[in-house]
Image: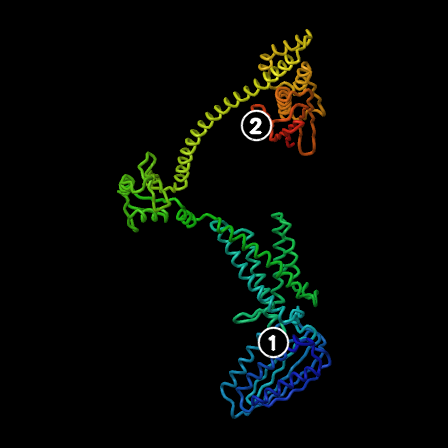
Amino acid sequence: MLAGKSDPAFNRERLQLVFNETAADLRTLGIDCAALVDIKRVLPASTVSVLYDCLYDFAAAAFAASNPILMLFVSDKAEAGEGEGSGDGVAAGRQQRRVVEIRVALEAEESAQTEGYTRSLEELRRVLERRNVRFTLDIASDGATLAVQVNEDKGGCVMEELLLTKIPVVATLTAVFFLLTAAQTLHALFLAARKSGRPVSAATVYETLLVVHLYLATATMLSAYANHGVLLLHLRVTALPLSALLWFNLALAVVGLTLAIRYRKPVMTWEIVLFALCSPPVIDAAGAFAPYLFIADAAFLTFRVSAGLILDIRRFRNSITRLSAIEAVDRLPEGLAMAEKNGRVLYMNDAMRWCLMELGFATDLSDVSMLWENLCEIAERGAAPINDVLPEGVRIQIGEDNVRLFKRDTAEVNGKTYRRLAAIDVTEEERLNTTIARTNVLLEQANRELEESLARVREVARNEAMLHMKARVHDTIGQRLSILHRYLEDGSSNPKALDQVTNLVRSMIEDLARADDEQSPTELASIVHAFELVGVRIEQIGSLPKAPAVAEAFVTICREAATNAVKHGQAHNVRIAFEESGSSYTLRVTNDGLAGPSDFREGTGLPSMREAVGAVGGTCQVTATQPFTLEAVVPR
């Protein structure tokens, strides 16, 4: 704990303070104790931890003595060569040249010793034998002497840097490795279960060895957390040095490399490298960076084991077993029942049981010999309009929004014939049929309405054709008659003009039969020429719009406006002006004829002009004062 809070190394003064405090604590508990420290080198926390634990174990045995007195002496020394075990119970360990020794002497009253005193010292011997230290324990009737030697440089403990790791880091790694060990064990069991009935595969063996790797990592972190000065795997009857057991990681790396080469899986390179790095030589060589090797190992294996477990769970959910097949049939929305020929039920899923319960059958129905007849009777009673006995089965409505089609047949399994009854959910199908029938009725009604509308359209088309012909007759004949009326009023005797007027009158029938798609500029030019025969001058300013429909409407207005000017206004000059802007086409017709009367009323001509310009979305306005002006505006 002192090492974790401050400097992990102990010099003579600091070590003297530790053992003086320990001696003071023992004196408060009734054991006279004195301590002397004589060391020349700085000791690591792991070595001090071993010395302290041995002293604690010896002091625990001293409580069984009468009036105990403890004297302890700590010193360091150098050995000339390989040391020998001194006395019985010496634990095997690597011998180093520099050692630290603690000697503890116990004095007690010989006459007051009990059998418990002897048993406590023998128990002390067994405890020390499980530690990775060299010790000598001499037991006498009036006391005992303990000498413990611990290697100084690395105290007989390889991978000492793990013991110097901060407690929060070691505790976290211990928890992570413990959880990973449990998860990897589950993964190995999943893999073994998936391979059941087949020889054990190399992958299964490798995953099992990975469990051992994680178990050793957990034991290493747990031993580092306990920090008894040496990394040990504590079992019930003994303790094994982890410095030797961790060579297993190097063997695991070799196995992984073999599998990677055999199955051509270069992705295993990372874990192989990590396993090799977690072997004792690499950990010793890493020094202060040794904890980072275990951190990297924990991080990588967290990802690997988690991914393996996720895949195992997905495979388990998607795998097909006898139980999963039965469960799938139970969850089917379609009802299914199997029975023997005599009607004894062998199997019935939840959907079929629900259907029969809703229809009033017993919940524990075990005989279905008369079930089909009962279903037919329910359908024929017609409790619902949709219920019916059909060639393909019996259709029955169950509840308010569920329709089932019951069908029966036989199935042969292993040469034996069984009855099979299915309740197929046709709710959506019936709903679609109802919707289709309702739609057909609406379509028939719409068809009748459409036929009536077409008849009305044909009638309207005939009326429009008649109106169009009336307007054309009015325009053409009115124009010719106006010209003829003006010619007669003028009393001209020019034979050439008479011939032209005569031809103009004779061509009325041909003009009426002319196609409607005659080019508007040509028609406008013919109007101008016709009125010039009777001395009416038509002045054109601008040109017709390029839009054919607008141009045709403007020509119609020009013809009617010129005819009205000659017929009603006695005009001799007519001015036609075409204008275009970014938003509209404009036609303005003026004449020098008489102004309209005060009670001016529209006759046949003006409505026909309004109709012509309205057909292309325009408007028409008349100014009856002199000069008589007509203006038509059509938006672009």
Asked where in the image residue 90 lies, by quadrant, the reply is bottom right
Q: As rendered, which of 64 and 325 lies closer to the eye?
A: 325
Mark 1 vs mark 2: in front: 2
Q: Position of residue 21 (x, y in %)?
A: 63, 85
Q: Secondary structure at mark 1?
A: loop
Query: Residue at position x 63%, y 62% from top?
Result: 247
Residue, disc 2: 601
Vertical comparison of 512 with 310: above or below: above
Q: Position of residue 624 (x, y in %)?
A: 63, 28
For the residue carrying disc 2, how many other residues have a C-alpha within 10 Å: few (<14), some (14-19), or many (20+)? few
Using the image, tell me which numbered label, if any, was put on residue 309.
none
Residue 622 can be seen in this image: yes
Asked if residue 452 lies left or right of residue 78, the reply is left
Query: Residue at position x 50%, y 88% from top?
Result: 114
Vertical comparison of 488 with 212: above or below: above
Residue, disc 1: 90
Asked if residue 387 lies left or right of residue 465, the reply is left
Q: As rendered, which of 461 and 610 lies closer to the eye?
A: 610
Q: How is the image coloured?
A: rainbow
Q: Amino acid at mark 1?
A: Val
Sequence-wise first label, 1 or 2: 1
Q: Amino acid at mark 2?
A: Arg
Q: Position of residue 315 (x, y in %)?
A: 51, 50
